[in-house]
Amino acid sequence: GWLWRHELLKPMAIILGLMNLLGAMSTAVFILFAQEVLQTSVFVFAVLGTAGAVGGSLGGIIAPRISKRLGSGRSLALTLATVPATSLVIGLTSSWQIVWILLAFSTIFAVLWNVITVSLRQKIIPSELLGRVNSVYRFFGWGSIPIGAFLGGVVVSVMENFTTREIALRSPYFVAAALGFVLMFFAVPKLTTEKIDKARATS
C-alpha cells in the first residue's frame, strides 16, 4: 500500500517494469537475431556477450559522474531515451560491431538508472518498510521480463506469416523502439529532478 500511494516510487516502479518488458522482447530472440541476421560465429556471439560486462564496468565508473553533472531527472530521462534509440538502431543494422557498442552503451545507462533509483529508495522508504517495499518494487522490475520475452516470441511468430524471416527477427526491436518512445514521452515528466529532490527532502 505504501508504494502504491507514493507519487514518485509508484510511477518509477511501473516505468522500470515497462522498460524491462521492452528489453526482454528483443533479448528473447537475440540468439536467433545474432545467428541469422548478424551471421555471427560462435566466437563472435561470445564476444557480443562481453558487451554487458564492459558496459557494466564502465557504468560503475562514470554513472555517478553523469548523475552529478546532469542531475537525477535528466539522467533518468537520458536512460529512458536509450531504450528506443538502441532498439531502433540494432533493429536496422547488420553489423555485430555496432550491436556490441550499443549493448555496452545501453548497459552503462542501465547502471546509471540503478545508481540513482537504488539510493533513492534507500533514502525515502521508511526503514521498517524497506524490505517489503523493495520486494514489491522488484516484482514490477523482474515480473515483467517473462511477459516481454513471451511477447517478443509472439511478434516474431506473427510477423513470419506476413514477411521474411529476417524482418520478423528484426521486428521485436522495432516494436520495442516504438513503444519505448511512447514510454519516454509519458515517463520523463514523472521523474523530474524537482520531484526527486522533493521526495528526498520529505523523507
Image (cartoon, rainbow, N blue to C red):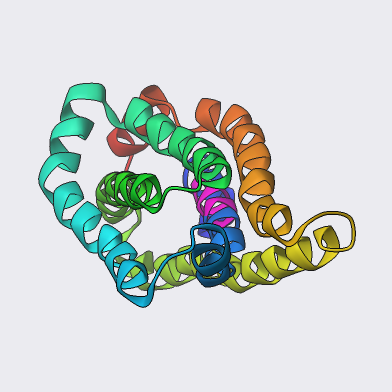
Using the rendered image of the protein, determine whether residue 3 is visible from the camera's viewpoint. Answer: yes
For residue 196, side relative to residue 188 (left or right): left
Residue 18 drawn at (x, y percent): 59, 52
Q: Give the range drawn in magenta.
A: 12-19
Q: Which is more toward the observer, 62 or 166?
A: 166
**Number of numbered tags placed on the structure image:** 0
Residue 74 drawn at (x, y percent): 36, 25
Instruction: State the residue lying farthest toward the right.
Output: 162
Q: Which residue is drawn at 33% across and 36% down?
A: 202
Q: Which residue is drawn at 29% across and 50% down?
A: 104
Q: Which residue is drawn at 71% across and 69% down?
A: 153
Instruction: State the residue lying farthest toward the bottom.
Output: 42
In the image, residue 142 sits, relative to residue 82, either above or below, namely below
Q: Which is more toward the observer, 27 or 179?
A: 27
In the image, residue 183 sits, relative to residue 165, either above or below, namely above
Residue 157 in the magenta stretch? The answer is: no
Main structural element of the magenta stretch: helix, strand or loop? helix
The quarter holding residue 102 reads top left
> Where is the N terminus found, in terms of image quarters?
bottom right
In the image, residue 1 sits, relative to residue 196, either above or below, namely below
For residue 172, side relative to residue 12 (left or right): right
Residue 4 drawn at (x, y percent): 58, 54
Residue 13 in the magenta stretch? The answer is: yes
In the image, residue 203 sits, relative to residue 52, either above or below, namely above
The quarter holding residue 36 reads bottom right
Instruction: State the residue lying farthest toward the left.
Output: 61
> Where is the C terminus found, in terms of image quarters?
top left
Using the rendered image of the protein, determine whether residue 198 is visible from the camera's viewpoint. Answer: no
Q: Residue at x 29, y 60 (%)?
A: 52
